[in-house]
Structures are given as C-alpha cells and as structure tokens.
Amino acid sequence: MHPFLLWRIFTASVTATNQTTCQLQGNFNLPGISKAGDIILGGMFNVHLHRFESSRHFEQAPEQTRCKGFNFRSFRHVQTMIFAIEEINRSRTLLSNITIGYKILDDCSSPTIATKAALTLANGMEEMISASDCKGLPNVLAIVGGSESSQSIAIARTIGPFRMPLISYFSTCACLSNRQEYPAFYRTIPSDYYQSKLLAQLVKTFGWTWIGAVRSNNDYGNFGMEAFMEDIEKLGICVAFSVSFSRTDPQEKVTEIVQVIKKSTTKVIVAFSATGEMRILLREIVRQNVTGIQWIGSEAWVTAELLTPGESTKFLTGTIGPAVHVAEVLGLRDFLLQVHPSTYPGNSLMAEFWETTFKCTLLSGNKVKSDVVPENPQCTGHESLHGVNNAYSDITMDGSSSNVYKAVYVFAHAVHEMLACEDGKGPFTNGTCAHISTYEPWQLLHYMQSVNFTTSSGDKIYFDSNGDPVAMYDLINWQVNNHGYPVVVTVGYYDASVTSGQSIALNKEAIVWNDGNNKVPRAVCSDSCPPGTRKVSRKGQPICCFDCAQCADGEFSNTTDALDCIKCPLEYWPNPNKDKCVAKEIEFLDFGEILGIVLVTLALVGICGTIAIAGVFLQHKDTPIVKANNSELSFLLLFALTLCFLCSLTFIGEPSFWSCILRRVIFSITFVLCISCILAKTILVLMAFQATLPNNNLMRWFGPTQQRFGVFGLTFIQGFICTVWLSIAAPFPMKNTSYYKEIIILECRVGSITAFYCVSGYIAFLSCVCFVLAFLARKLPDNFNEAQCITFSMLIFCAVWITFIPAYVSSPGKYTVATEVFAILASSFALLLCIFVPKCTIILFKPENNTRKHVMSKMPSKNL
C-alpha cells in the first residue's frame, strides 16, 4: 500500500456492505486558491495571523477552522507563487507541453492547522473516493510553504517520512538542516546558523558587550537565540537579560518583559522573534511609551510593518538587522497590481483581501463574501491597487517574494530534469526513469538535491548537503524620510560564500541610530580598561562587568581590556602610564654631573696642593725642619698622597672591567703606602728620642735603608694580597636592578669578599698601629714633635673611615660611590693638612723657627 494512504486509513471507514470506497470522517474547510494542471504544486501561506479559538465540547464535532487578522505580505506570497507558475507554464524551454497546477491553502500561522493543510494537500479533499484511488499517488508532488519554522517542523515531520519535498521560503531554524530528522526539507532562505553568526558579528562590530535578548518561545526563536548565544559567548559579549514569550501568553507576561527592558542597564536589544510575537511586544512598548531602544532584529520581523508609520518612526527608527536578499522579479509588481476579485470569482481569500484593502464590502446578491464588517460601503469593482501602499504592493521591502519565486522554480527545474531522463540511463533501479503518469515524490526528491540554475535576476540557486542555499543577506536600517515616514534603507550586505573575515560589507556612515543621529549608541556593563590596567572580574557578575586595576610595579599592558599585565624585561621598566616598557635609567657617578664635578675638583685641589707642598719642601730641602724626620719619607708620603687623590678619580665615571680593578688595587696599595710612610715616620720619632739616652744604639737599626725596606715590605704585603684577590675573583662591573625598581645602578662588585676583607683589614690594622704609636709619642719633649701632627691626622683618618661604614651602607646608588670617594679625599686631606701644613707654615711664614737650634731644643709638650 502506498505510504500516503496512512492518513486516509486513519480517517476513513470502509463500508460494511462492500469494501469499494473510502470516506473521509470530516470535511476540512480550509480557505485557499487552486487551479488544475498536469502536475500539481501545493502551497501553504499564513494569509491570516490568528485563528478563532472555540471552546471544546467532546459531545459534538468541533467547529470548522476560522482565521482572522489578514496578512498582506503573505497574500503577496500567494500571488507570487501563482505568478511564477503562470510564467513557467508560458515558458517554451522549461517544462514545455506540461502545465503546472496549484493548490494553495491558508495555515493561519498555526502548526496544528499547517499539519492539517499539509495532509489535505497530500490526500485531497474529496469526501468519498474509490478503493482503487486510495492506492493512487498523492494529490500534490511537492509543497511550497512553511511561513515559520514551527509550521515547517510540523509539516516536515508529517510528510517527510514519505519523502514528499517541502520547499520553504521563510523558515530559517538551523534545526531544519538536520537531514536525518528532515530528509525532504529544502529552503530558499538561509539558515539561522548564518544569521546567528551575522547578528553576533554586528554586535561585535559596534563594540557592544552588554546587550538584552528577546526571543519568541518557539522553534525559530529558541534555536536561533541558542546559536546566537553560543557565538557571542566566544566573542566575549554578555547578556544583561534574556526573556521569551509566545503569542498565546497572557498580557501580564508581555507587560513584565517590557518592565525588564525598562529597568535594564542596556538599551541595545537583540530580538530573535517571529513577526506575530514581535507585533505583540511592540504594541506593549508603544503602550508604555518606552523609547530609546536600539533594536537589532532578525530577518523574520525586521522588514515587517508591525506598527503604524507614526509609531514606527518613534519606536523603531535605528533598527538594524539582516533581511532576505532582495532580488528583482521582473513583471511581478505589474502582476500584483492587476489582481482583481473577478480573476478568482467566489474566492473568499481574494474577497477578503479586496475588502480589507479598500475598506468596502463585496456583495453577491445579499451574501457577504468575507468576515469584514458589512457596515463598510459596497465595493464598486473599479478600485485600483496602483495607489495602494502596504505590505502587499511593496515588493522591495524584503526578499521573501523572490524566495517564493525561487522555490517554485526549484520545483519546476527538478521536475524538468526528472522528465528529461532517458530510459536505461536513469538514476533508479536498472537505469529506470520516473514517468509523468507514475512518478512518486521520492523520485522528485532525488532531482531536488542536484538543482542548479540561475534566475532571471542573476541569482545562482543550488543546495548544499543539508538542503540549504548559499547564505546572503541585505543589512537594513530603519530611517525616516523627508516626509517623516519610516523607510528601510540597505546599508550593507552579508555573503557567506566570501572568504571568512570579508563576508560582511557595512557602510557605517549611512546608519541612523535610535536617537536619529549617526553616533553609535554605547552598550557596555563596564567601560573598557585602557592600556596600563587590567580587568578584574566582579564577583557573581558576568565577565563583561569588571573593574580596572592599575598594573603592578614592573608590569605593563599595551592593549585595551587586558586580562593580565605583562612583566617588563629585567632592564626595562614601565612608563608612567604603564602601557609600554622603556629602558631603565642608568645611574652611576658621572663626571658631568654636579656631584662628580665637585669631587673631581676636590681631587684636583688635593693633587695641586700636594704638588705645591712637595715644591715647597723641595725648595727648602736643606732646612732643618725638612730634614728633621727624614725628608725622603716626606717626599714618598707626598707621592703616595698624590696617588690617593688620583685613585679617587677612578671611582668616577661608568664602571668597566679595568676601572673596577684599578679603583680597588690602587686604593688599597696607595693607602698602605701612605700609612707605611706615616708609620715609619712615627717609629723614627720614637727611635730618635730613645737615641738621646746613654748607651742607646737603636738608631743604627732603623736607618734610611731599614726605613725604605720597612715601607716597601708593608706595601708589598698589600700588593701580594691584591694579586691573590685578582687571581681568585677580581672585582667586576655589574648592573644592580634590585636596589631601585626603575633604575639600573652600574657598580663594581668586589668579587672575592674574603680578599676584600683582607685588604681592608690590613689597612685598618696598619692605621691602628700607626695611631697607637703616634699617640704614645705625642708628649715627647721636642720643640717640634711631629708625632703630635701624626696623632691628630690619624685620629681624623680613623674617624673618617669609621663613619664611612654606616654612611656607605645607607647611601643609595651612585651616592654609595660618592661616599667612598669623599672618604678617600677627606682622609687624604687630613693626612696632607695635618702633617705638612704646620711645617709649610714655619718654612714660609716663620723662617726664624726653621733653625737647628730651635728644632733640637727640648721643651715640655702640651697635652693634646
């Protein structure tokens, strides 16, 4: 038995007397338009927006289905289907000698009625047929229809198992691309899979991260919004609220949704809704006078006339969204404007269209042909559609008519290819073909998949493996014309066949937003974090709601809305704005800065003073006061002091490998040389006094040779320690990045700490010995006792270096080096001034005291 008889079996009774007829159990009085032909194409359109709800009494048969709310756009679709069929019938190349008839029914925007209409088209409406006809072919070969996704799902699930093709012009739910569940479904409108991606990209393009979401609670809205949510989640966009409703919900729920919209912190709302639901929502928006909303609409409603022109101007200006690509159908507008009730005499749909358009009543005798209130004046029959401006006559407002046109041509091309088959070369068993008298819908389905043609407007039509066409949308924007009326303006397009990243072309300057200007409205939960900061999520809130935290020290961010800050490289530091890393400031004691100039000046003064004193001593070398304590040691000490002043210069300037070595070695050796000379002079003072005692021959053990060897020996020991130091771990330059975070200090590290302590300890040891000996000799009864000068100089020397230690430790950066240089200069000046200035004073200003007698006379020395 043929599968399409299932419905007849369920609804028919076979007579008990003879089993030769099948009888319908009820009469389906669905309004429609039909015309006979060699092959019949079914059509289903939501010519009415609602149906009258009648109470259910299970004691009697239900009332006949009655619909209300005439839909001009869908009636235009009906006429577009008729126009396409008549155009094909006139064609000499497509289905020549074959005429296409049609049976078009109204599904009243109801999945229930759509299912009934689909079964009615497949099985016919005859109340009684012979049993042999019950085993025949279906009444229609395919169906064009499915005004909404819910209707298409209901229809496809009903007739799909029998492989009857359903070609939808307006059902976009991505769920219908499931070939296992809907094996016979095709459509000439893109899938919501692409629309969802497009809407997400639009939201991203305009920088919106905090949006509202409204959807109709049906398959179209739920599946479409689900795909949209998945896409925006990947793009980091958050939803402030998400609500859904259906047209059958009570008014209280719609009111609550509008209250949610009013209280929301965002005014950019994406509405994935069918036309019926959106009309209900917008009427409540108008009632509560909620303005300032930036609507992002789905193609189902974004081009529909949902409000009056004045209301649309106030509440829908700025609306943007995808619309079905508008392709011109040549001759269609003229055909639509030529429609007249006389063309379809007695047809209720045509009569209602005429009466609703012209607000008049068509009478045949005394019988009203439609449900329009009869108080309207009688129609004359001479009314003209040329002056009408509504959704029926405006074919440029959306591309749905061209999709109906394409759907009819898809059917015609599939039938043409099926009938062009040659026996023996066919695609079916044993190379057979389908024949006009015996073909079945599943055979046509085979040719549907391979349809590939170009329309008269240049659009290429073919299907992918899921029965979907190439996705193309026009991006439209609701604007206001010079007369104050709303108009739909194309501001871009979307072509899914173009390489990713270039599929959207948008003229942003041409867009008018909800406030009537060209400034893009803002929709963010939190302002973007500028470079130099990072995002900190707010606990319990979406990721789009965050605070901005300044990057920590040493970190930067150079992008907007950075999740984390990046640590600068070791030798870099963030700038004050913390949006990039800059090279750290290099710090060292430079010759060119004020502090360096001061220290260099002091060193030069010391050098010049030392040379001057040496000159004075050299000029008066034969005087008693110069000879008094071994002039050779005095000159050697002056030379050592000159080296001390010079070594301070090695501490100034950018540290290098050699400068680090020189500053430590020269400092260590020259200071030991100085102290060795002073120590020798101190010992010489003690020896000289002891030599005046009877039977004392100490001076012969500490003559000039012994003095030289003593100085050399003590200095050699320091030189040896320095040599070991350099061989083990010599001083080296280093970049100190730990003391200052934003400054690199160039400094010299000592290398071996042990060697450094040995060198420093040796200097300290000699200084202490020298100070003790000088202190013991300070009261010797010489008229000019040099031990007093040495004691005072060593006291200052030791005080300088003792105070140097805490100052050195606490001084930052280059001031550490400056402290050490100052200690070197201070101690050198102390030795120079305390030891040599008193002698120079006598030589230059008191020559009468520069006599052997005065120098050798003994007088009690005053206590220091």
Image (cartoon, rainbow, N blue to C red):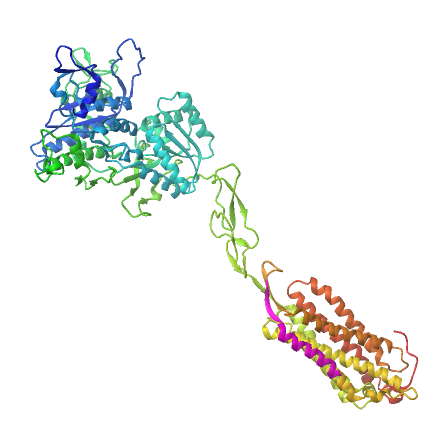
Q: Is residue 309 above or below residue 617?
A: above
Residue 708 lies left or right of residue 142; in this view the side is right
Determine if the magenta segment contains residue 519: no
Nearest the eye: 206 or 10: 10
- Where does residue 703 sit, x and y in percent of width and height? 81, 88
Q: Seen from this angle, which residue lies furthest top?
A: 59
Residue 165 lies left or right of residue 584; in this view the side is left
Determine if the magenta segment contains residue 731: yes
Residue 627 lies left or right of residue 108; in this view the side is right
**Magenta-tinted stretch:** 711-736
Nearest the eye: 411 or 290: 411
Q: Count up the numbered dots.
A: 0
- Where does residue 849 sit, x and y in percent of width and height? 87, 85
Figure quadrant of residue 201:
top left
* Residue occupying the point 68% across, 72% down: 755
What is the chief secondary structure element of the magenta stretch?
helix
The answer to whether residue 649 shows anywhere in this view is: no
- The image quadrant where one finds the C terminus is bottom right
The answer to whether residue 781 shows anywhere in this view is: yes
Q: Seen from this angle, which residue lies furthest bottom?
A: 622
